[in-house]
Image (tube, rainbow, N blue to C red):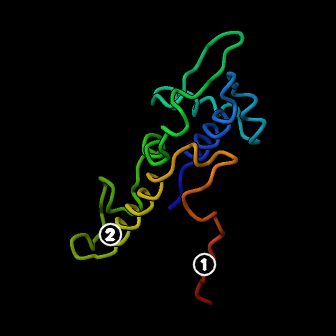
Amino acid sequence: MRLTMMTDYALRLLMYVAQQPQRLCTIAEVAQAHGVSEAHLMKVTHQLGLQGWIETVRGKGGGMRLAHAPADINLGAVVRSVEPDFDLVECFGTGDHCMLTGNCRLAGVLQGALHDFMAHLDGVTLADLLPGTDLPFAPLRRMRVDRPSS
C-alpha cells in the first residue's frame, strides 16, 4: 500500500505546525522546511482546514495553526480524512471486473492487512510524532523485501 502525496504532505504539515504552537505558520515556510511545492501545500492546507485539523487565518500576518492539541489528533483519522480511497485491489472498488470475485481469498487477506495498518495508525497521535516524546511502538526500520530471482 502506498499513501498519496497529499497524505504525506498533510502529515508533514501537521508535524511542522505542531512544533510551532506559539505562532501561525505559513505555507511558504512549511514548503521550504520540507522541500515541497507551495502549490501542493496550498491544496493540502485547504483540505486540512475543511476537515477541521487546522485553523487558517487569511491576510497579512496570517497563517495556520492546529485546531486541536497534538494529543487529540489521531493519525488514523487524519489519513482517513485525506486519502481518497483504500482500494488496494480492483475488487475493493466500485468498478470491479475481476473474474475471481466470490472465489478469491486474496481480497480477505488484503482487507485484513489494511485493517491492521489502519489500527496501527489509530494507536498514534500527532503528539507521538513530535521530538522528545516516547513512541508507543518500535522506531521505523526499512523492511527488506526478498524478491524472487529471475
Which residue in the protein does label 2 denote? Answer: 107
30 vs 112, left or right, is right
Name which quarter of the figure residue 140 lies in.
Answer: bottom right
Question: In the shown orientation, is residue 118 left or right of residue 44?
Answer: left
Image spot of residue 101 (x, y percent): 25, 69
Q: Looking at this rendering, what residue extends furthest in the bottom direction?
A: 150
Displayed quadrant of residue 16: top right
Does residue 53 lie above or below 3 as drawn?
A: above
Q: Residue at x 60, y 83 (%)?
A: 146
The local secondary structure at tag 1 comes to loop
Residue type, numbered disc 2? Ala
In the rendered image, the vertical position of residue 32 relative to residue 149, given as above or below = above
Q: Would you place residue 23 above or below residue 96 in this image?
A: above
The numbered disc on residue 145 is 1
Tag 2 or tag 1, which sits nearer the N-term? 2
Q: Residue 103's quadrant in the figure? A: bottom left
Identify the residue at horizontal 39%, vertical 56% (top origin). 87
What residue occupies the far top of the structure in this picture? 60
Left or right position of 99 against 122: left
Q: Secondary structure at mark 2?
A: helix
Taking 62 as reference, is 99 above or below it?
below
The foreground one among 30 and 105 is: 30
Amino acid at circle 1 = Val
Which x, y percent locates residue 36? 72, 40
Q: Mark 2 Cα within 10 Å, few/some/many (few <14, many 20+)?
A: some
Query: Callout 1: few (<14), some (14-19), or many (20+) C-alpha neighbours within 10 Å?
Result: few
Residue shown at the point (60%, 78%) measured from the top left: 145
Of discs 1 and 2, which sits in the foreground?
1
Pick the quarter of the image with the C terminus. Answer: bottom right
- In x, y percent, where is residue 143? 62, 73
